[in-house]
Amino acid sequence: MNAQALFTAYSTIVLREIRRFTRIWPQTLLPPAVTMTLYFIIFGNLIGSRIGEMGGFDYMSFIVPGLIMMAVITSSYANVVSSFFSMKFQRSVEELLVSPVPNWIILAGYVTGGMARGLGIGVIVTLLSLAFTQLKIHSLPMVVVTVFLTSALFAVGGFINALLATKFDDVSIVPTFVLTPLTYLGGVFYSIDLLPDFWQGVSMANPILYMVNGFRFGILGVSDVNPFVSLGMILVFIVVLSFIALKLLARGKGIRH
């Protein structure tokens, strides 16, 4: 395929994904906005007023970057896993398999679609947070790079989950038993400096910790880990997961029977 044909195939997948989640916006865009608003009210206003400062900032300002990142992570992941698995279930994915579209274009299209939803939710949550606190960006490049890379990473993760899933229950296993615990333990609501040394070391094994803190550094200028180490970790995970996704797609794992 020439460059024009590759771009046409890529843009077709992306546009279809964007139309899909915008068409059902009450199910895809509204729930995260409502959930994050409740977090702002309960954790930020009610509990935060009793906690006081954390990391040199009031508690609301401290948790806002983590909550934005949490919304981006879950939305990017959910969009790809639900969309691609639905195509598998409906057997319409076979149209892609018999087409001359390269596997990397298929992966890139779905990942970009997932990023579009994740970043869109991120913007919505950011605007909602302005009703509760003031955000002063410390490093705009760090904010943009971190949120884009994190969204891409979890979109790839959602693609792998969709490939391996054999039934609808499999789609919810990873978000429920892996993604949610790692997110809550990833420094969204606290600084790991509050933990004993042993648990600080355990927390460093949580990949989401690096993403949350990289984004927090971009907004507030504070972080529990080196922000450049955070970016390096995210890039490594993207490369590894993308390689796995392409290998599984080439083998037809979960698609060809």
Image: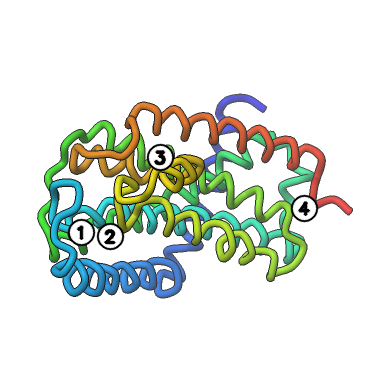
Instruction: Please tell me which of labels 4 and 1 falls first in the chain.
Output: 4
Judging by the rendered image, the residue that carries numbered circle 3 is 210
Relative image position of residue 156 (x, y in whole percent): 57, 44
Nearer the camera: disc 4 or disc 1: 1
Instruction: Please tell me which of labels 2 and 3 falls first in the chain.
Output: 2
Q: Alpha carbon of mark 4 to alpha carbon of mark 1: how far?
A: 40 Å
Relative image position of residue 195 (x, y in whole percent): 36, 50
Q: Alpha carbon of mark 1 to alpha carbon of mark 3: how far?
A: 24 Å
Q: Is residue 179 left or right of residue 172?
A: left
Judging by the rendered image, the residue that carries numbered circle 1 is 127
Assign a secondary structure to mark 1.
helix
Instruction: Please tell me which of labels 4 and 3 falls first in the chain.
Output: 4
Judging by the rendered image, the residue that carries numbered circle 2 is 124
Label ID, residue 94: 4
Callout 1 crowding tier (Cα within 10 Å): few <14, some 14–19, many ≥20: few
Assign a secondary structure to mark 2.
helix
Assign a secondary structure to mark 4.
helix
Q: Residue at x 18, y 64 (%)?
A: 51
Nearer the camera: disc 1 or disc 3: 3
Q: Amino acid at mark 2?
A: Ile
